[in-house]
């Protein structure tokens, strides 16, 4: 019993400290963010060790954007609804082996390479979620365990 409790506490402590702010956000990063998202509201920053992530809202859309330490924009994820994604994405999901799984979250992912993809997070059971990444054509690109 003690070992399980200790393990649980270690996991919770580790999870709580992952988003801890380790260093000051560089001016290059905040300046690049302000230039790209001038109308952003409720901005909060997270240090992701090799990058910085801004969580914010624009017009009631929940978004998160990732920048390199030098201020280079890497990607932006925007919360979306399955009903609003393109037909190709819906069809790709319905043809996948996860079609019967409950959808937890849908994100539109825009990257610096000009590609738009869609991430659909599904719940497989009480302990297992999957991140499904679809191309804009509806092809399943990756299938990863969600952390």
Image: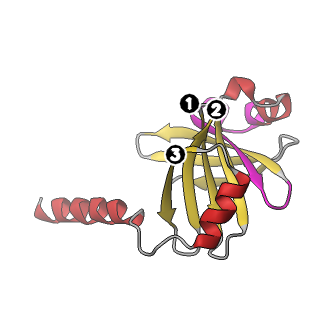
- Secondary element under disc 3, as helix, strand or loop, is strand
As drawn, the residue found furthest toward the top would be 83
Quarter of image, res 70: bottom right
- Secondary element under disc 2, as helix, strand or loop, is loop
The image position of residue 111, as x and y in percent, is 77, 57
Q: Tell me how far mark 2 sits from mark 3, CA to CA.
A: 29 Å
Q: Earlier in the sequence, mark 1 or mark 2?
A: 2
Q: Which mark is residue 59?
A: 2
Q: Tell me how far mark 3 sits from mark 1, CA to CA.
A: 10 Å
The image position of residue 115, as x and y in percent, is 84, 53
Q: Nearer the viewer, residue 126 or 86?
A: 86
Q: Nearer the viewer, residue 92 or 86?
A: 86
The image position of residue 45, as x and y in percent, is 50, 59
Magenta span includes 25 = no
For the residues carrying marks 2 and 3, which lies nearer the camera in this image? 2
Q: Which mark is residue 129?
A: 3
The answer to whether the residue labelled 2 contacts the one labelled 3, judged by CB atoms less than 8 Å apart, is no
The answer to whether the residue labelled 1 contacts the one labelled 2, judged by CB atoms less than 8 Å apart, is no
Above or below residue 70? Residue 91 is: above
Q: Which residue is mark 1?
A: 102
Q: Tell me how far mark 1 sits from mark 2, CA to CA.
A: 27 Å
Dot 1, how many residues are within 10 Å of its Cα: few (below 14), some (14-19), or many (20+)? few
Q: Nearer the viewer, residue 27 or 106?
A: 27
The image position of residue 43, as x and y in percent, is 52, 49
Q: Earlier in the sequence, mark 2 or mark 3?
A: 2
Query: Could you tell me which residue is drawn at 11 percent across and 63 percent down?
Result: 2
Image: magenta residue range: 93-114
Query: Could you tell me which residue is drawn at 71 percent across and 57 percent down?
Result: 35
Query: As drawn, is 4 to the left or to the right of 103?
Result: left
């Amino acid at each position: 019993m003690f070992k399980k409790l200790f393990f649980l506490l270690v996991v919770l402590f580790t999870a709580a400290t992952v988003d801890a702010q380790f260093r000051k956000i560089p001016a290059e990063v905040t300046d690049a963010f302000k230039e790209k998202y001038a109308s952003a509201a409720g901005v909060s920053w997270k240090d992701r060790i090799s990058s910085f992530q801004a969580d914010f809202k624009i017009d009631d859309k929940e978004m998160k954007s990732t920048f390199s330490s030098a201020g280079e924009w890497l990607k932006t994820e925007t919360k979306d609804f399955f009903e609003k994604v393109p037909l190709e994405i819906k069809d790709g999901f319905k043809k996948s082996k996860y079609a019967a799984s409950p959808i937890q979250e849908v994100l539109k992912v825009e990257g610096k390479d000009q590609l738009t993809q869609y991430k659909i997070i599904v719940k497989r059971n009480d302990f297992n979620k999957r991140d499904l990444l679809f191309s804009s054509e509806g092809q399943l690109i990756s299938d990863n365990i969600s952390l």
